[in-house]
Image (spheres, rainbow, N blue to C red):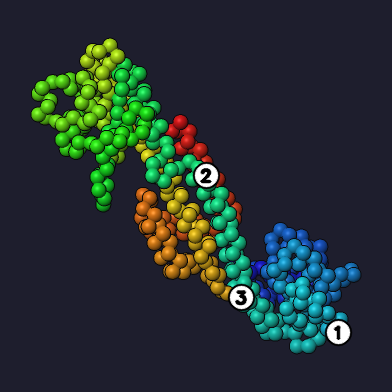
């Protein structure tokens, strides 16, 4: 942001001259000129001022030093150049206390060169100090925001298992059991990540993982169901089935099964298995049609639950990284507005994220999200951070509603 310069002088020719000198100087500052203390206070209250160029004698009983004291009450960072023909009346200690950094005497060589040289000297000091104050305020605003987000994320997410997923599984199995009159059901999930080992797990009707060891997926009934790409019913006591598949422990004591494949994601396959109707009869074509109709609903429900867990973990990693970054940063005397944290800080954060072993994202991705939050605050201030926080809370509420 360009530095703001306010000229206050009750003589219109002087105001016009100073304004012309500054607007044609190439200093890149924003300039405004007013005639009296009331207009100066009104402008400062609305726009803020970095450098004030004040006439000592403003007329109507006002003087520049008193005006500067009033400006100082609203903006302790304001700096001033006092223009006066009464140097003997100046009070240097009081003037320095409220921000006077230079004097220009109207009766002694006050010309364009001396005027602009005095302004340039102050702007060269104001700009880096202003950037550092803005950086500090933004960093504090980010820390306040992430400290508010962190308990929200922590309270609704477990590090090892997304909290909504068991509930989603329970609701899906319960719905299918009621519609088909099955006595029990399980959900079998197989996840094959691009760069990691296969995850193969089974969940009971309550949504909790089953503790029993599983038969490898390639030899399981679930693999056969996936290959058929449609719901199918089987008699598990059929002798011909024994040579084709190897039953899981939870399938071995059952008689009838209705199994349906559900494509949740490109790398995630799910099979729902429903066992033994209440009336003891095999599952019928009507049951298969009901399960087929419910497959899309089940896939969407599971995607939402998994997406919520992914979102919460990502947010948790990002806000924790941001908090650690704000703890580790040491502000230099002059700091560019969007300079990233020092390399040693980023390396320490990466090491911590890698050591946790609980993140679904790589450390670089988590740090990019944290850096995006920080740069957003630097560019657009606390208001942008508050807006970002409101969006995060809105997303959380939306996902909570979708998975309830």
* Local secondary structure at mark 2: helix
Label 1 and label 3: CA atoms lie apart by 31 Å
Residue 88: numbered disc: 1
In the image as oriented, which residue stretches furthest toward the right? 61
In the rendered image, is residue 130 in sight? yes
**Residue 88: percent from the left, percent from the top?**
86, 84
Taking 265 as reference, is 144 left or right?
Answer: right
Label 2 and label 1: CA atoms lie apart by 62 Å
Residue 86 location, quadrant: bottom right
In the rendered image, is residue 116 in sight? no
Q: Mark 2 or mark 1: which comes first in sequence?
A: 1
Q: Quadrant of the N terminus?
A: bottom right
Residue 127 location, quadrant: bottom right
Q: Residues within 10 Å of mark 2 (few under 14, many from 20)?
A: some
Taking 134 as reference, is 34 left or right?
Answer: right
Q: Mark 1 or mark 3: which comes first in sequence?
A: 3
The residue closer to the viewer here, 106 or 374, is: 374
In the image as oriented, which residue stretches furthest toward the top? 279
- The residue where tag 2 is placed is 152
Q: Nearer the viewer, mark 1 or mark 3?
A: 1
- The residue where tag 3 is placed is 27
Q: Mark 2 or mark 3: which comes first in sequence?
A: 3
């Amino acid at each position: 942001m360009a530095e703001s310069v306010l000229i206050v002088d009750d003589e219109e020719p002087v105001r016009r001259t100073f304004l012309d000198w500054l607007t044609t100087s190439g200093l890149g500052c924003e300039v405004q000129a007013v005639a009296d203390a009331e207009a100066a206070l009104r402008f400062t209250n609305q726009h803020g001022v970095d450098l004030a160029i004040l006439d000592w004698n403003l007329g109507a009983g006002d003087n520049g030093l008193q005006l500067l004291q009033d400006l100082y009450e609203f903006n302790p960072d304001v700096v001033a150049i006092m223009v006066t023909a009464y140097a003997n009346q100046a009070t240097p200690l009081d003037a320095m206390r409220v921000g006077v950094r230079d004097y220009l005497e109207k009766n002694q060589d006050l010309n364009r060169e001396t005027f602009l040289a005095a302004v340039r000297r102050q702007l060269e000091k104001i700009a880096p100090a202003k950037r550092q104050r803005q950086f500090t305020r933004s960093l504090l605003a980010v820390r306040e925001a992430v400290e508010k987000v962190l308990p929200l994320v922590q309270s609704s997410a477990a590090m090892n298992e997304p909290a909504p997923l068991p509930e989603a599984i329970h609701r899906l199995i319960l719905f299918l059991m009621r519609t088909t009159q099955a006595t029990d059901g399980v959900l079998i999930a197989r996840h094959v990540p691009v760069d990691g080992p296969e995850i193969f797990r089974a969940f009971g009707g309550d949504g909790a993982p089953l503790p029993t060891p599983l038969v490898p997926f390639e030899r399981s009934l679930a693999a056969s169901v996936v290959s058929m790409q449609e719901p199918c019913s089987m008699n598990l006591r059929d002798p011909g089935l024994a040579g084709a598949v190897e039953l899981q422990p939870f399938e071995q004591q059952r008689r009838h099964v209705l199994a349906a494949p559900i494509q949740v994601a490109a790398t995630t396959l799910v099979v729902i298995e429903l066992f033994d109707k209440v009336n003891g009869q095999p599952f019928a074509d009507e049951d298969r049609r009901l399960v087929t109709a419910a497959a899309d609903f089940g896939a969407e429900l599971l995607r939402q639950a998994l997406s919520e867990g992914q979102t919460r973990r990502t947010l948790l990693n990002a806000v924790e990284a941001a908090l650690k970054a704000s703890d580790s940063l040491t502000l230099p005397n002059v700091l560019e507005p969007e300079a990233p944290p020092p390399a040693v800080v980023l390396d320490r954060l990466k090491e911590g994220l890698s050591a946790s072993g609980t993140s679904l994202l790589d450390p670089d991705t988590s740090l990019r999200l944290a850096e995006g939050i920080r740069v957003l605050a630097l560019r657009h201030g606390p208001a942008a951070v508050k807006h970002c926080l409101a969006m995060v809370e809105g997303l959380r509420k939306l996902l909570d509603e979708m998975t309830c």
